[in-house]
Structures are given as C-alpha cells and as structure tokens.
Amino acid sequence: MKFNKKLVVATLSTALGLGIVGSITGTVAWYQYSTRATTSIIGSSGGKTGVLQIKMAGAEDSTYTRDLYTATLTSGRSNTVLYPCTFGGIENNVALPATAKRNPSVGKGNPENWADATSAVDYIQYSVTLRAQQYNASTEQVEPLQDINIYLSDIMLEDADTTAGDLTSALRMHIHTNDGTTDKYFLIGSAATTLDTYGHLDIDGDGVADKVGGYEKDPHHNDLIMYGVENSQQKCMGISDVEGTTTAIGKTNASGTLNVTVTLWLEGWAQLNPYTSPNTDVKAMWSNKTIGKTIHAGLTFDVDTQFDA
C-alpha cells in the first residue's frame, strides 16, 4: 500500500545483545539464558503538511519529538538483563496475561509454580504515544488529525548473526494500541506460528526428560513430567501479515493521538535446535551456541495517503 511520505515517520529500533550471566552447569534449558538490551527510537524526514510525533506515554506534551533514545525508553530499568520467558498459550489478538513466567524448578510442571517474569527486568515493555498533526492554512493553527489509520510500514525481528544458531524464531513482539476507547492487540513473530507451550523438559540436565521421581513404590515415579499447560498453544502473526499491509494497528482519536505499548521477549518454548538426547520427547532445549548473540528488532509507524495536500 502507499504510505503518506508528507508525514514525519516515527521509527522504533531495538538492538539487543545476548550475554550470559553467571555460570551454567549440566544441560542448559531455555530458562537459563540471558540477554542484554538497548533500545532507541529513530525518526526519518518527512514533508511540510503534517507530522507524526512520538513521546513516552504520560510525559508532557512538550516532549513530543521525532526521536526517542535508549536513556528515555529504558529509564527505571533495574538492569539490562533479559531472560527467555513465556506468556503461555495466547492468540494473536488478545491482551497479554498480567504475568509472564520463567525459570521452572525440576518437578514443577504447573506454570503457576514457576517464577514470575518481571517487566523491565526479564523482558522489554514500554509505552509511547503517537500524535498526528496538520497545519491549517485558513486558521493558521496546528490541528490534530483525527481518525487517522496508523500502520506498520516496516517490522524487524531477526538474529544479527545466524552462523551459530538462529534465534529469530524465538523473538516475539506484542503490540497493544488504545485510542481512549478501543483496544487492539497484535502478537507478531518472524513468521506466522502455532507453537506448543507445553512439553517435556530436561531441567536437571541428566540427558533425559525429567521424571516425577520419588519412592519406587509410587506407581507414577517413572512418569514424565509435563511442563506448562497441556494442549496450550501460542498463535502469532508473521511480519508479512502486518508489515506494509492494509492492517491498521489503530486510529488517532479526537486529540490526534494513539497510545502504543510494545512488549518484546524471547519465547522460551521456541524449538531452536534439535535435541540430541535419546529421549526425543524433550522440547525447547537451546544449544549453548546461542549464548552471546545479538538480535535486532524494530518498528516503523506510518499513515495512509488520505491527507496528501
């Protein structure tokens, strides 16, 4: 579709560098990986008839700008370490659960017994406000552009270096937009995916799927542990389903604004590498080659052509 190049385009660019914190022993499960991240917003030049500006949600209107950088977006973070986590089985058009989960203990299959993942610690989440304005020559005033469709003309979700294993399929981006009355939700991966968010894991690192264990007289001591909610699935859209299409992520309201919350994480249930254990039922075990890698993520917001001068 044709986008309006007479508007300044706000671009969200996220660069993440993965690194390991502390030491890991045994077989490394997805819950044991960590990343380091920085984020920035970059603006691109536009025309004279209108402007699409961006600011942190809740900030003063005087802070509207074309550019938001790392120090602004990540203010309040206790550190820059991210851990692969999961929001469980969700559809692409629903709100995220209130809490993500990470780091299950051996034997605790129910995610309710896993550690809570925390925004600004384990995954990236921030909110911005977009504002569309246009100069009215007859009134000589800058006026809000109401009921304007906002699109994503570009989405980036990729592993910067795939020579040592590719993390691209594990990247997830959830977008929540709100114009004051209407909420819209988008769960996006590099490709449209239906992913099982349950399965057998080797958390204790002994080379086979974890078992219930306990006393030998217990008839279930040799049963495999099912981690996650059995039969749950996560269904996300692919980049091509949203990028540069007629799918609007929201509309500006009477004030010409649209609130956008972006959540970015590494989905722990992603099947990154074949598991080499004799027990082929084990899922979501990541190769240690994925440690220390860099990933790229970004968004470009744009508008349609209806306001060309």
Image (cartoon, rainbow, N blue to C red):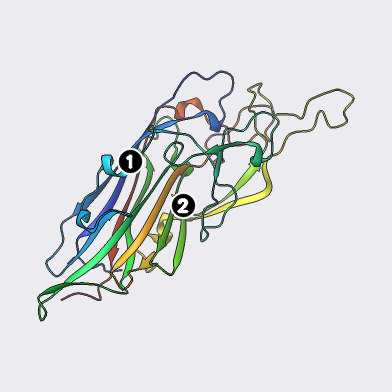
Q: Which residue position is annotated with label 1?
A: 74
Q: Which residue position is annotated with label 2?
A: 191
Q: What element carries label 1?
A: loop
The answer to whether any part of residue 296 appears in the image is yes
Quarter holding the N terminus is bottom left
64 relative to 194 in the view: left or right: left
Question: Residue at point 57% right, 29% down?
Answer: 29
Relative depth, front residue between 172 and 158: 172
Amino acid on which the number 2 mark rests in the picture: Ala
**Location of residue 292 in the rendering, given as x and y in whole percent from the top left corner:** 40, 27
Question: Residue at point 40% right, 61% down?
Answer: 177
81 relative to 70 in the view: left or right: right
108 in relation to 189, above or below: above
Question: Real-space Cα distance between discs 1 and 2?
Answer: 27 Å
201 relative to 74 in the view: left or right: right
**Location of residue 248 in the rendering, given as x and y in whole percent from the top left corner:** 38, 67
Q: How crowded is mark 2: few (under 14 residues within 10 Å), some or many (20 or more)?
A: some
**Location of residue 102 in the rendering, given as x and y in whole percent from the top left corner:** 56, 36
- Residue 103's quadrant in the figure? top right
